[in-house]
Image (spheres, rainbow, N blue to C red):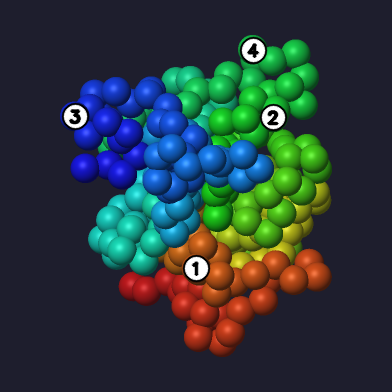
Amino acid sequence: MAPFSPDHTRDPLRFPMERPSASVRKGLPQGLKTRGVRPPPFHPHTLLPHSTMKNIVILLSGRGSNFEAILRTARAEDWEKAGLKIAAVLSNRPEAKGLETARAEGLDAYAVDHKAYPTREAFEEELVRLIEPYDPAVVVLAGFMRILTPTFVSRFEGRILNIHPALLPLFPGLDTHRRCIEAGCRVHGSTVHFVSAVLDGGAIIGQSVVPVMTTDTPETLAARLLPYEHKVYPKCVRAVAEGRVKLVDGRAVMDDATARELAVFYRD
Ligand code: GRF
C-alpha cells in the first residue's frame, strides 16, 4: 500500500496523476493544519517526499550505453537498498535510443526537443522544471550533446557529472580518439568530472585508462575504450551520490580508498 494514497481503496498505480492532499504529502495525519509548512517537492512518479531515497537523473542525447551501464550496475549492486534510485531520464532528442530504453525499463522518460525552444535559456528552463521535482542528488550527463549555460550548471553545482572520452586535461572537445592517435599517445582513456562553466574543465572524479595499439583507428580505439567508460562511470555516480566524493574549492575531494576505486585500468 502506498502511504501516499489518501483513500486506501484507491490503487495509486491506477490513479497515478492523483495528487494526494497536503497533509498526506507531508506525512501528517489527515486533518492537521499544515499552514506555514513548506510542502516537499512532489511529482506523481517520484518516491515519497519523506523517503531518504536519493534520486539520480540522467540526461542523454543518443544511444545511451553509459546510461545502460549505470542502470545495469545499479540493479546488480542493488543501489535502491543503499538508498539510491535512478529516477528519470531526459533527452533533447525525442528519437534517442536511450529514451526508448528508459521507457522500456519503466523509468520516467522525458523528451525535451531543444529545437522547439527559441533560446538555450528557454530549453534549460524546461529541463529544470522537469528535473527539480526529483531533487536529484546527482544529475548525470551521459552523452548529452548540448552545451549547458553557467546558470544551469551552477544550479546543480557539485552534483552534476559528465563523462568525456579522453584523459582530461588532454583533449577537451570533440574528436578525441583521432587526436589521441595523431598525438602518438600510448594510452587513452575516459574522464568523469564535475561539470563546471568551462567545457570539459571541471574537477576530475575518476578516470579509466586503455592502451593505444599501433594499428588503431579512431573507431577501434573508441571500441576498446567504451567498456571502460562503462566501468568507471557507475562507480563515480555512486561515489558522488553517497557523498564519498565532494566538490570543494574546485577540486574533487575523496579518501584514498575511493581514489583507488575510481582509477580503472585496462586488463587483457
Ligand atoms: C561516450 O563516448 C561519452 O564518453 C561521450 O559521449 C558518448 C556517449 O555514448 N560523452 P552513449 O550514448 O553513452 O553510448
Q: What residue is drawn where x is 75% and y is 13%? A: 118
Question: Is residue 88 something that shows in the picture?
Answer: no
Residue 120, horizontal then vertical, whole percent: 75, 25
Disc 2 from disc 4: Cα separation? 12 Å
Q: What residue is drawn where x is 47% and y is 72%? A: 264
Pointer 3 local density, CA inside 10 Å: few below 14, some 14–19, many at least 20: few
User: Label 2: which residue?
Assistant: 124
Quadrant of residue 181 in the image? bottom right
User: Could you tell me the amino acid type at mark 3?
Assistant: Thr
User: Label 3: which residue?
Assistant: 9
Q: Is mark 3 within 8 Å of ligand 1?
A: no
Quadrant of residue 16 in the image? top left
Q: Quadrant of the N terminus?
A: top left
User: Could you tell me the amino acid type at mark 4?
Assistant: Ala
User: Could you tell me the amino acid type at mark 1?
Assistant: Glu
Disc 2 from disc 1: Cα separation? 27 Å
User: Label 4: which residue?
Assistant: 116
SS assignment at label 2: helix
Pointer 2 local density, CA inside 10 Å: few below 14, some 14–19, many at least 20: some
Quadrant of residue 14 in the image? top left
Q: Are marks 2 and 1 in contact (CB under 8 Å)?
A: no
| Number of numbered tags placed on the structure image | 4
Pointer 1 local density, CA inside 10 Å: few below 14, some 14–19, many at least 20: some
Asked if 190 appears above or below 59 in the picture, the reply is below
Q: Of 70 and 110, which appears nearest the observer? A: 110
